Image (tube, grey):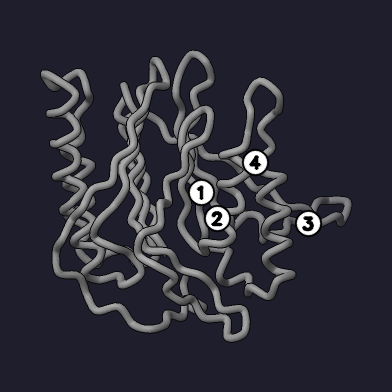
Amino acid sequence: MTMIISAHLEGCLLIAADNRAMVCDVETGEMLLSHDDEAKIKLWSLGAIAGTGETVFLNRIMDYFSHFQAKEQQLKQMDVIYEEIEKRLMEGVPKEMLINNTLIFSMFDGEQSHLYSIPIEPFFKEIERKDGVKVIHPYVHEIYPWIVDVTCFNLPPDMSSLQNFQRHLRSLSSFDNESTFLEYHIQQLKKVFAVQASIDPSITTSFDLYIQICATGHSIALHIENPVLASPFPKKLNYWDRK
């Protein structure tokens, strides 16, 4: 289902995502393993986008971002998400497989890079207005400096690895060079993904990492191998009862 860790480090943005792709079997309603080398962080003209959840649904939305041309269009991500939800439901995917999905994306607006999340659940929640008309209110949430956003299926019973990661975040300016900055946060992330994979069979220990500089929009994307012993992966996973 994916684990995504995103953080605003004041001078730069960080997005890390594992590499296990999960797809819904529309005949059984079960979530199945597709493969373990999914590049879940996709680049687009103004930044990067990643998502947790059902791979086909997420990839279709990411394709929209990937083909977006900032000079020619206005970003209409909410309309695209709504259309893809409708399409995936028509294809037989239960809403339970989509409702807990989340998108994370960064965007350089010409002056500053910003980090956002879009939970899919509000697209399914109807609110009745005073006039009796039912509407939905999906939203884009901005992640501000020194905030860490973690999206995953199973939160670990011991939150210490995530808490330590947030506690030990450091800005790029606090390091002598970019290489030291990268290595420091890579080692911190390796611990988090290893712990999470030990209790959640829907993610890999290895992960992709994206860093974007806030002031310029310049970025770097890396794949990080993290060969530790993970928990055995079952042939099928059923996430219908997720709360």
Mark 1 vs 4, N-terminal side: 4
Q: Are marks 1 and 4 in contact (CB under 8 Å)?
A: yes
As shown in the figure, which amino acid type bears the numbered disc 3?
Glu
Q: CA–CA distance between discs 1 and 4?
A: 10 Å
Q: Which residue is mark 4?
A: 77
| Spot occupied by residue 131 in the image (x, y as percentages of width and height) | 88, 51
Q: Amino acid at mark 2?
A: Leu
How many angstroms separate mark 3 from mark 1 (CA)? 26 Å
Quadrant showing the N terminus: bottom left
Q: Which mark is residue 128?
A: 3
* Of callouts 4 and 3, the N-terminal one: 4
Q: Do tag 4 and tag 3 residues touch (Cβ < 8 Å)?
A: no
Q: Given the image, on which type of amino acid does mark 4 rest?
A: Gln
**Position of residue 207 measured from the top left corner of the image (x, y, whole percent):** 29, 52
Instruction: Report which residue position mark 2 lands on.
Output: 58
Mark 2 element type: helix
